[in-house]
Amino acid sequence: MSTTAPNGGSPVTEPGGVPRSHLDLVRHAVLAASSHNTQPWLFRLEPGAISILPDRSRRCPAVDPDDHHLYASLGCAAENLLVAARATGLKGHLTCPSPESGVRIDLEAAAPAPSALFAAIPERQCSRSEYDGKPMSVDELRRLEIAGRGDGVAVKLLTDRPSIERVCEFVTAGNIAQFADPAWASELRTWIRFNAREAARAGDGLYGPAMGSPDVPRWLGSLFMRVGFSAANQNRKDARHIRSSAAIAVVCSEVDDIPHWIEAGRCYERMALEATALGLRTAFINQPVEVQSLRASMAGFLGVGNHRPDFIVRIGRGPEMPRSRRRPVESVLV
């Protein structure tokens, strides 16, 4: 398997004929965001193309019953891949030949175009911490809004305190609904990695210190969850985090279908990379869009009619947090 090398050179392949450029692109793609850090993607390498396929063994039916987050995660990975392709001398063309089967990115040689977004790929993280509450500039807000636009997708930025407080109320209601669901709680537990050894072994999931929890043995983490895992505790933490944020971004799709979910993932990832390039932190607060009844109310609050709110993201300046792990590239190739 080979592909045209950038600048017209001879193809460079790994043992077995896999294009080295393709593997480098996948290495950047797997650094993308995904719900619970499930990394629900598989990559098929072809001469001149890469397909990103859904890995349904990594579904989260309790929190994501319609697979919205799963397909949006494919869009996040695709955006990273396209940004990396441009930077390294390849131009990518994304299509969804069969939306349920993921996306295909055809690649052709082009002039390398490194960018701040490319440099931000390994730096981006979901920073679950308090921010400093300082406002962003008009230019920063404009750049984030532009980055979050796509085909049938846009982002609404909320910066006034009453709107941010209203989002806090939605998140509170979302936590109450989710914590009352035993299936949701059980599913979440399966994706928590309480310590560095667990995180390294699994290469996925929610690493405790990345969420602001200490690195502890599983038995102690499990005990803490039985004693302290509650909507009330989560709401106190989320309220502090939300109120410390400079802005809340809500990514919305015009149509509630798989191609738009994928596009929404691309738009979120691009906005998060832009925020990272600006020295800003981002973190999901998706509870109101994961509870169906609240999602409709959230759309009404935003004034977006029947558009789907896909993601809710808080933005601000804050500390770097420990990083979630990723699985080896070899484990996601088919």
Image (spheres, helix red, strand yellow):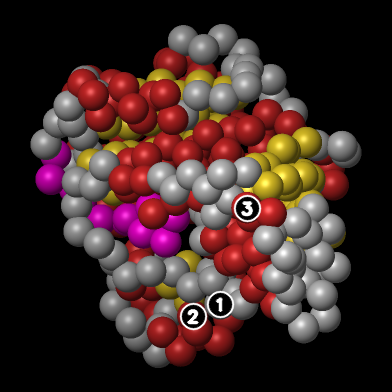
Residues at discs 3 and 2 in contact (Cβ within 8 Å): no
Using the image as rendered, state which of residue 298 and residue 235 is in the foreground: 298
Q: Tags 2 and 1 in contact by the CB under 8 Å rule?
A: yes
Q: Is residue 241 left or right of residue 225?
A: left
Q: Position of residue 85 (x, y in %)?
A: 59, 50
Question: For the residue marked with disc 1, what is the amino acid?
Answer: Gly
**Is residue 175 shown left or right of residue 212?**
right
Which residue is under mark 1?
A: 203
Dot 3 falls on a residue whose secondary structure is helix
> Counting other residues with Cα less than 10 Å from the Cα at mark 3, is it few (<14), some (14-19), or many (20 or more)?
few
In the rendered image, residue 270 lying in the magenta stretch gets the answer: no
Magenta highlight range: 120-133
Query: Residue at label 2?
Result: 199
Q: Distance of mark 3 from mark 1, alpha carbons?
A: 35 Å
Q: Please, what is the three-letter code of the amino acid marked with disc 2?
A: Ala
Q: Residue at x 32, y 70 (%)?
A: 322
| Magenta: main secondary structure | loop
Residue under label 3? 7
Q: CA distance from mark 3 to mark 2?
A: 40 Å
Instruction: Give the residue furthest to the right.
Output: 98
